[in-house]
Image (cartoon, helix red, strand yellow):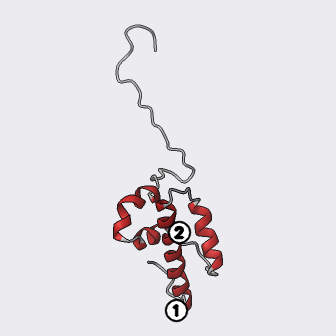
Amino acid sequence: MVIGCHSSGSSQTAYISAVAEIVAELVQAYEKRLTVNLSRLRSETSRRYGLNTIPTLVDIIAAIPEQHKATLIPYLRVKPIRSASGIAVVVRGANSMRCAVCTC
């Protein structure tokens, strides 16, 4: 769990408690087959504990109990982003030979 080097012990405790509460909510929602808005859950929990940052997915995944990891981690993983805007550059190579059918 990465927390700033200048953070106090109480803020570390609040961060750990917030992550634990998020994990408990996720486990409970999974068992009851409820849909959870993870972004909202993370921001509301962060606000409730008075945190300056929102708990990261890495910290949440690390706090999941072993018996629930196989079921919850697929829901928490995110796709890798190829660029900041979400748009990947596509490169089109030039033809190496002249076209025999037309005058390309």
Whole-percent x, y for residue 31 in the image: 46, 61
Q: Residue at x 64, y 81 (%)?
A: 50
Task: Please tell me how many numbered marks the rendered image carries.
Answer: 2
Label 2 crowd bin: few (<14), some (14–19), many (20+), radius 10 Å: some
Give 88 or 98, whichever is nearer the viewer: 88
Give 93 or 40, whichever is nearer the viewer: 40
Q: Residue at x 45, y 72 (%)?
A: 59
Residue tagged by mark 2? 25
Quadrant in which residue 62 is drawn: bottom left
Q: In the rendered image, which quarter contains the N terminus?
A: bottom left
| Left or right of residue 26: residue 40 | right
Label 1 crowd bin: few (<14), some (14–19), many (20+), radius 10 Å: few
Give 79 or 67, whichever is nearer the viewer: 67
Whole-percent x, y for residue 40 in the image: 62, 64
Residue tagged by mark 1? 9
Q: Which numbered disc covers residue 30?
A: none
Tell me: residue 34, above or below residue 94: below
Whole-percent x, y for residue 65 in the image: 38, 71
Q: Amino acid at mark 1?
A: Gly
Tell me: residue 2, above or below residue 86: below
